């Protein structure tokens, strides 16, 4: 790897720190932009991000900073790893600083509150001069930090961007696959957070492995229907950013959304569950946005509807299950058998 190659990661949460360290270990000079000067100083002096990845010793090529201009200077790849609610604000803050030859990539798995915009929509509208991409897959940051084997997907309409990310982040424990379906990869990452909350509730209630398996497969059906309406390819969900991310997030206590669901299923309120987590659980906001969109566009998403009723209307789980099991019995694998041929 060339010493002259540079990379910027905007957002010092768990995943932003993890991918910044991958590049740094690979010999890339990597700036990690963070808002908090104390967190920057902790990394600078102790080589640790104590809040998010306290057990990871960060490579010396990772340079923390609160200076956006310094972070972006000379970076060929710019990753945005900030929560969806502040994504547009951060993107706007780099306008006038970022250059047209810099590639911009979102790692945020969420939907903008109130607008239903995906993060790629924001990148394209605010930074139209830059080629953009999105990254998604079964990428639990704490496992990446431990160098446990995983893979991700970089989606972009620009082949050179896809290749640049593969060349920069691909290593012995982190494999990078390519896709041209930006919306499919992005929707997979956003939607699975909803079902991870439900999976946490199912686990807390000890409803069994059959129930969990049914949840995962019917989740994929709902995701496919939603994706088709948004212009994405439902087949993308058969890959890492769909079923791969869904399995990882719906089965691991390392998943923030799973933990929120587990706490809620254990008797805590949503507010208590989120406060206990101490981090952003994107699925909480995504649930509200997807529920609204599915209502407006008549998309059949009974799991989304049921989870919304539980969390925001205090409907008991038993009532939600009763409604789900009494619903329409339609085709198993979506798009293989039309409903009128049932």
Image (cartoon, rainbow, N blue to C red):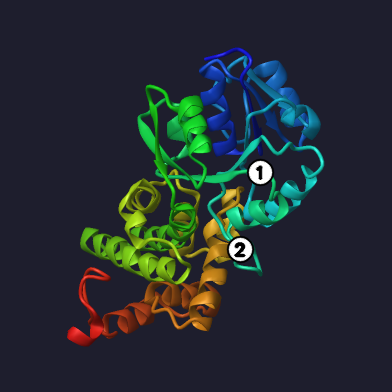
Q: Is residue 223 above or below residue 125?
A: below
Residue located beneath label 2 in the image:
117
Give coordinates of residue 290: x percent, y percent: 52, 70
Give coordinates of residue 215: x percent, y percent: 30, 65
Residue at 38%, 71% (x, y): give it.
225
Residue at 73%, 47% (x, y): give it.
90
**For this rendering, which residue is in front, 206 or 102?**
102
**For this rendering, which residue is in front, 27 or 318?**
27
Q: Is residue 78 above or below residue 63?
A: below
Q: CA distance from mark 1 to mark 2?
A: 18 Å
Residue at 48%, 77% (x, y): give it.
294
Q: Secondary structure at mark 2?
A: loop
Q: Which mark is residue 130?
A: 1
Q: Is residue 305 above or below residue 86?
A: below
Q: Neighbour class for label 1 at 10 Å: few (<14), some, many (≥20)?
A: some
Q: Nearer the viewer, mark 1 or mark 2?
A: 1
Q: Neighbour class for label 2 at 10 Å: few (<14), some, many (≥20)?
A: some
Q: Is residue 326 above or below residue 218?
A: below
Residue at 34%, 58% (x, y): give it.
203
Specify whether 34 is left or right of 268: right
**For this rendering, which residue is in front, 235 or 14?**
235
**For this rendering, which residue is in front, 25 or 2?**
2
Give coordinates of residue 83: x percent, y percent: 63, 50
Specify whether 27 is left or right of 206: right
Q: Earlier in the sequence, mark 1 or mark 2?
A: 2
Is residue 12 at least partly visible in the picture? no
Q: Which mark is residue 101?
A: none
């Amino acid at each position: 790897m060339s010493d002259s190659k540079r990379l910027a990661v905007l957002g010092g949460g768990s995943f932003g720190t993890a991918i910044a360290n991958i590049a740094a270990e690979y010999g890339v000079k990597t700036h990690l932009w963070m808002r908090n000067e104390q967190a920057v100083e902790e990394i600078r002096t102790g080589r640790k991000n104590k809040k998010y990845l306290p057990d990871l010793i960060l490579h010396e090529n990772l340079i923390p900073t609160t200076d956006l201009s310094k972070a972006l200077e000379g970076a060929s790849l710019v990753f945005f790893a900030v929560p969806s609610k502040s994504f547009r604000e951060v993107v706007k803050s780099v306008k006038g600083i970022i250059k047209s030859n810099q590639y911009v990539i979102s790692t945020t798995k969420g939907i903008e509150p109130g607008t239903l915009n995906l993060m790629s929509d924001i990148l394209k509208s605010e930074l139209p001069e830059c080629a953009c991409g999105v990254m998604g897959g079964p990428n639990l940051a704490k496992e990446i930090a431990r160098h446990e084997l995983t893979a991700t997907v970089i989606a972009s309409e620009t082949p050179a961007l896809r290749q640049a990310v593969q060349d920069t982040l691909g290593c012995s424990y982190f494999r990078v696959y390519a896709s041209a379906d930006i919306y499919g990869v992005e929707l997979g990452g956003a939607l699975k957070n909803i079902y991870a909350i439900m999976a946490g509730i199912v686990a807390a209630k000890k409803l069994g492995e059959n129930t969990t398996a049914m949840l995962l497969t019917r989740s994929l059906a709902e995701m496919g229907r939603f994706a088709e309406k948004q212009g994405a390819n439902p087949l993308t969900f058969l890959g890492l950013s769909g079923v791969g991310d869904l399995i990882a997030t719906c089965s691991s206590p390392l998943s923030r959304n799973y933990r929120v669901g587990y706490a809620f299923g254990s008797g805590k309120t949503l507010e208590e569950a989120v406060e206990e987590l101490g981090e952003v659980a994107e699925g909480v906001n995504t649930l509200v946005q997807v529920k609204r969109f599915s209502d407006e566009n008549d998309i059949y998403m009974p799991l989304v509807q049921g989870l919304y009723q539980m969390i925001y209307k205090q409907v008991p789980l038993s009532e939600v299950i009763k409604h789900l099991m009494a619903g329409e019995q339609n085709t198993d694998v979506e798009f293989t058998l039309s409903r009128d041929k049932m």
